[in-house]
Image (tube, helix red, strand yellow):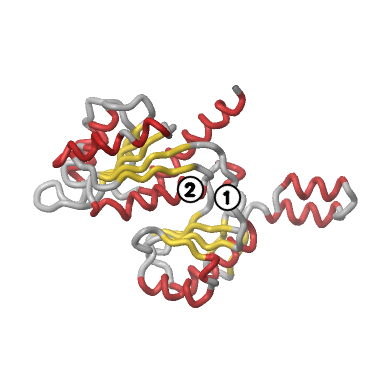
Amino acid sequence: MELKNILTKVRDNEMEPKMAEEQIRSMGYVQVSDIAKVDIFRRHRTGIMEAILAEGKDPQDVVEIAKAQVAATGRVLITRLGSGHRKALESNFNPEGLEWSLHKNLAVVHDGTPVPQTGGIVAIITAGTADIDVAEEARMVACEMGCETIAIYDVGVAGFHRLVGEMLKLQDRKPDAIVVAAGREGTLPTVVSGLVDVPVIGVPVSTGYGAGAKGEAALLSMLQSCSVLSVVNIDAGFVAGSFAARIANTVAKARNRE
């Protein structure tokens, strides 16, 4: 329950002050058995929602943490899903309460609670199809933070003509921030940043082989960019999506005040 709702109930004599105090204190986190402390107030504190990193967790633990988060806030994003995690989610939640990424390595579990739309717009661009899973992480995070998203996939510089045509999509719905995911030599974020007048966040992806593999060449290339962009860690789609959505939501607030 949000703080404003609690205070309203106290004002309207629908809740005793003692009960209100207990609920406000519980806003810090919810204890899930002895395995997790779910930060259910993170969205209100920072603008970024709590998410569950499934990687390294037992599938049933992921289910229990998800249930606690949904009970408290109505929705939760789960990242880096393996096959065991997917099966556990499908066995424990109704299909209507599950939303999947393109390749089902991420999911949103919800009870029907909608995401309040902020008016922010985030574009997500990938160099190749191998970069899509990381890009989808950024896209779903931005969506869960209330932004409209525009996905443009597989437009790397090996075929620059693909990018030129797809960038026309951004003229009708100009984004407030752009996330660009690229592996190999990681050139695409630099190129995009040289074409647009909005913040660009580069995400190096751990594709490629030989010298500079595992995203290292892409990371160094983006850090050395001669066009202005921010760079997150290798495969850090969640961070990129959160940062882009923060920018977009700030811009949207300013736009709404005009």
Q: Is residue 227 above or below residue 246?
A: above
Q: In this view, does 62 lie above or below 131?
A: below
Which residue extends farthest top?
258
Is residue 12 shown left or right of residue 221? right
**Residue lying at 20% horizontally and 37% vertically, measured from the top left:** 187
Mark found first going from the N terminus, 2 or 1: 1
Q: Position of residue 139 (x, y in %)?
A: 41, 48
**Residue lying at 32% horizontally and 52% vertically, measured from the top left:** 134
- The residue at which mark 2 appears reads as 143
Q: Position of residue 178 (x, y in %)?
A: 37, 36
Q: Quadrant of the N terminus?
A: bottom right
Element type where label 1 sits in the image? loop
Q: In which quarter of the image is residue 14?
A: bottom right
Is residue 208 shown left or right of residue 54? left
Is residue 17 shown left or right of residue 99? right
Q: Nearer the viewer, residue 20 or 81?
A: 81
Which residue extends farthest bottom?
91
- The residue at which mark 1 appears reads as 115
Q: Residues within 10 Å of mark 2 (few under 14, many from 20)?
A: many
Q: Quadrant of the C terminus?
A: top right
Which amino acid, by three-letter code, is at mark 2? Answer: Cys
Which amino acid, by three-letter code, is at mark 1? Answer: Val
For the residues labelled 2 and 1, say whether their Cβ atoms are less than 8 Å apart.
Answer: yes
Q: Is residue 251 above or below residue 147?
A: above
